[in-house]
Image (cartoon, grey):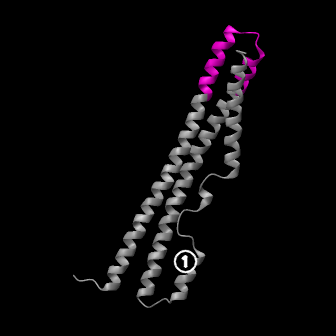
Amino acid sequence: MTLEPIEKHLEAIAQKRKDLFIRSLNFVDNYYNNSRNYYLVLLFLSFIIILADFSLFFSFEDDIFIRISLFFAAISFFFSLALYLNFLEKGSEKVGDIFGDLDFKYKQELNILRNFYAGRMNETDIRNFYLKNEIGVNKKYFGSSYEMALRWINFILLSLALILILFNFF
């Protein structure tokens, strides 16, 4: 079976777009793995600081820095846990939306190119499609400023807990 040059061109475009689709999915997957690891590391660090505070609390019972550090570490631990569970819930929904959105755009683009080569569509329609539609992953699926503010608050709480532990020894 011999293919027409147009069919070969369409197959080449389809293969390139499929590769781009797979690379986009890998990018999204790496982003969500890194975010999940970030929350797990903060959860682990806050737990370690809580354990250190408990061991120091029994050694220096009357020290106010240890009590405040334990308070900040406990807040950071529960905050990290809440953020992690929220990330797991929302992250799986976002990844599903990204997969569906990319797949829809890929199929839509392939249909438009087929219609163009079949003579059912003109160049201005294709230009309009590419100018009006983003082909790729929408930024709304990634970290928002609200999420980043929560991460910074959690990081500051954890840092304060660690600094107050160190104040105990001065």
Magenta stretch bounds: 46-72
Indicate the position of residue 77 as horizontal and vertical percent values.
65, 30
Q: Is residue 92 magenta?
A: no
Three-letter amino acid code at disc 1? Tyr
Q: Residue at x 76, y 10 (%)?
A: 62
Residue furthest out toward the left: 1
Figure check: 22 above or below 74: below
Indicate the position of residue 32 as horizontal and vertical percent values.
53, 48
Q: Quadrant of the C terminus?
A: top right
Residue closer to the observer: 11 or 90: 11
Element at label 1: helix
Left or right of 10? Residue 101 is right
Indicate the position of residue 26 as horizontal and vertical percent values.
45, 55
Residue closer to the observer: 7 or 100: 7
Residue furthest out toward the front: 170
Q: Residue at x 53, y 65 (%)?
A: 136
Which class describes the residues within 10 Å of circle 1: few (<14), some (14-19), or many (20+)? few
Answer with the quarter of the image where residue 162 lies: top right
Could you tell me what secondary structure mostly forms the magenta stretch? helix
Figure check: 70 above or below 20: above
Residue hosting label 1: 130
The number of numbered badges drawn on the structure is 1
Indicate the position of residue 47 as horizontal and vertical percent values.
60, 26
Q: Residue at x 58, y 62 (%)?
A: 138
Q: Quadrant of the N terminus?
A: bottom left
Q: Residue at x 50, y 62 (%)?
A: 100
